[in-house]
Image: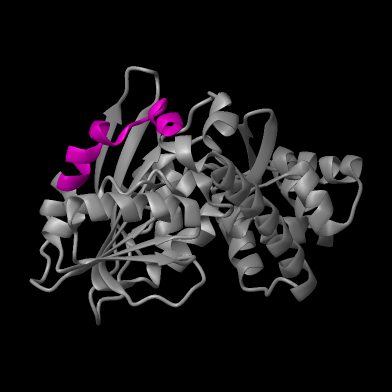
Amino acid sequence: MHNSAAVLIAPSSPSLDDLALLAKAAGDALRLRILRALANDSFGVLELTQVFATTQSGMSHHLKVLAQAGLVATRREGNAIFYRRALPQTDSPLAAAHSGLLQSLDSQTLEPELCAKIAQIHAQRAAISRDYFARVADKFQAQQDLIASLPQYHDSVLSLLDSLNLPAEAHAIEVGPGDGAFLPALARRFARVSALDNSAAMLEQARQHCAQAGLNNVSLQLADALSDPCEPADCVVLNMVLHHLPAPAEALQQLSRLLKPGASLLLTELCPHDQAWARDACGDLWLGFEQDDLAQWAAHAGLRNADSVYVGLRNGFQLQIRHFQRPPAGDASIHRP
């Protein structure tokens, strides 16, 4: 009886056709390099042609083969299609082979020239975002409010923040504080607050806000939180910032270094949406994020997935307020999504 039950719940064997598709997809070195490059990122076809110095038709063919084998998935960002790795499905007969292939790929180091080309793509995306903020700093907040204004998620973020067991001399970092409207709430809860922004125009608005509120424990710094050296903090806050960053998954990797052991990352972001006007109106590089993607990226960055709050807005957008935590010292266990 025990053996019969085991047979009933065992996953089905993959068909020869399925195996052939997987073998075909994995049987080309360029396709394997594409999968390796997609380990923690997503790219459009034109970006991939730039990285791999191939034609658009050739790249489209390789992506079609990978998609037929279930190794890549697509996501529409406005008028563009972005490709990313497809996660192995636990109920798929090819799950073990799929997982094994990705693990083998991730043990390989991406060639330096490919890393340099990917860095160029990220730099191009970052330049688009910087140019936008330089042009519209004085009216950005009004544009952002068309999607989600601070009062719509302010209390939810503070509820998560107030649930943290913070030391008396706790230090907080807000990345991309915008006009500084959230800084007074942080200043009341932390002994020290560092506000980091790579836009001088936006930082000046935050400076004015702090002066009007009389905040004397807030340090405003013109800095890139993803690359410039920063003192680790007890809490890092990003409100509606990640969708402006050129490589969100890589950004979480870099942000994790700003967290002390046991510290928290609070992230307010949009759920996926199809309102492409946000790209031009608000300078958004990404049209929201899947909840599972954020959890997976955080896990790859060494962070635990903690509490989450979801807020539906009347204009059709939905917000996700996520709490990720770096494990305490000596505790290396990570919840993998």
8 shown above or below 259 = above
Q: Is 134 placed left or right of 148 in the picture?
A: right
Closer-to-camera residue (177/23): 177
In which quadrant of the rendered view does residue 291 lie?
A: top left
Q: Position of residue 130 (x, y in %)?
A: 59, 51
In which quadrant of the rendered view does residue 256 lie?
A: bottom left
- Chief secondary structure of the magenta span? helix
7 shown above or below 148 = below
Q: Position of residue 177 (x, y in %)?
A: 36, 52
What residue is drawn where x is 71% and y is 40%? 67
Q: Position of residue 252 (x, y in %)?
A: 45, 60
Q: Residue farthest to the left? A: 168
Camera sees residue 10: no
Camera sees residue 308: yes
Q: Which residues are magenta?
A: 142-158
Q: Position of residue 218 (x, y in %)?
A: 25, 64
- Give the position of the N terminus as an image quadrant: top left
Q: Residue farthest to the bottom? A: 330
Number of marks in the rendered image: 0
